Every structure is written in structure tokens, then in C-alpha cells.
Image (cartoon, rainbow, N blue to C red):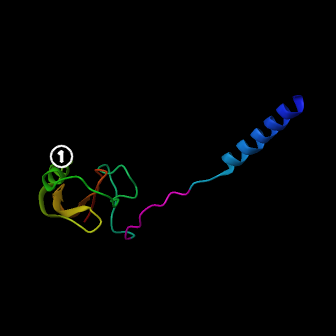
């Protein structure tokens, strides 16, 4: 009986050790380098992130306006389901994007 218990404990330790040795890889969607910049309106460094976007055009516009963007125009969802358009922020005309996570990113 003691032998069976010892074998069970040994196998549990060995099996548990291999579970900790496993690693995971996170795949971040590629964005054109140097095109989009994240800022205080984005919580994700990889933004804008492609994905099923449930924001309506009105909701996308309202979210941008709530974050200080004005004169939001040409708002359209692209093939990656990211809302893109033009807007003014701090007196500067920018390209603006809103992803399904609610991240807003802009470039001058």
C-alpha cells in the first residue's frame, strides 16, 4: 500500500512539473508600423485591434466626441471592422480609428 501511494505521489509531482513548463504565445495583429499611435484614448498598445465591432456609427461618433474629438467626418467601418474617419483634436485634423474594444487611436 505504501509503495502504491509513493508511486502516485511521484507521478503527480512529475506530471505537475510538466504543466508548469508549458508556455503560451500571444499573437498580436499586425498594424502598419509607424502609422497608428496610441494615447490616453487607447488601453491597448496593439490598437486598433481587428474584431467583430458592435458599435453603431452613432455610438462610434459619440465615443470619439466624448474623448475630445470634434468635427468627426467620413466615419466608415473598414474590412477589419474598425471604424475610421477624420476628426479634429486639439485644433489639429487627424485620422481617427475606433476598434471593437473601444480603443481610439489617431495620427496627424
Which percent across, then down, holds residue 62? 15, 49
> Residue at point 15% right, 56% down?
57
Point out the residue furthest to the bottom here: 32
Q: Quadrant of the C terminus?
A: bottom left
| Main SS class of the magenta portion in the image | loop
Say which of 7 and 29 sits in front. Answer: 7
Which percent across, then down, holds residue 20? 67, 46
Which percent across, then down, holds residue 72? 13, 58
Q: Quadrant of the N terminus?
A: top right
Say which of 22 and 15 sits in front. Answer: 15
- Whether residue 26 is in magenta: the answer is yes
Q: Which residue is mark 1?
A: 66
Q: Is residue 68 left or right of residue 29?
A: left
Q: Is residue 17 left or right of residue 72?
A: right
Which percent across, then down, holds residue 3? 89, 33
Say which of 89 and 8 sits in front. Answer: 8
Splitting the image into 4 quarters, where does residue 15 fall?
top right
> Residue at point 21% right, 48% down?
67
**Magenta extent:** 25-32
Splitting the image into 4 quarters, where does residue 92 fall?
bottom left
Q: Is residue 26 left or right of residue 10?
A: left
How many numbered discs sit on the rendered protein?
A: 1
**CA neighbours of label 1 inside 10 A, class few (<14), some (14 to 19), many (20+):** few
Asked which secondary structure carries label 1, the reply is: helix
Amino acid at each position: 500500500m505504501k509503495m502504491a501511494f509513493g508511486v502516485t505521489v511521484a507521478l503527480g509531482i512529475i506530471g505537475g512539473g510538466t504543466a508548469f513548463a508549458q508556455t503560451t504565445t500571444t499573437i498580436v495583429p499586425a498594424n502598419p508600423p509607424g502609422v497608428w499611435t496610441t494615447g490616453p484614448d487607447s488601453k491597448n498598445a496593439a490598437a486598433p485591434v481587428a474584431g467583430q465591432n458592435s458599435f453603431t456609427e452613432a455610438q462610434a461618433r459619440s465615443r470619439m466626441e466624448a474623448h475630445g474629438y470634434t468635427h468627426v467626418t467620413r466615419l466608415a467601418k473598414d474590412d477589419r471592422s474598425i471604424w475610421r474617419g477624420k476628426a479634429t483634436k486639439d485644433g489639429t485634423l487627424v485620422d481617427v480609428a475606433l476598434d471593437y474594444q473601444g480603443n481610439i487611436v489617431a495620427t496627424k
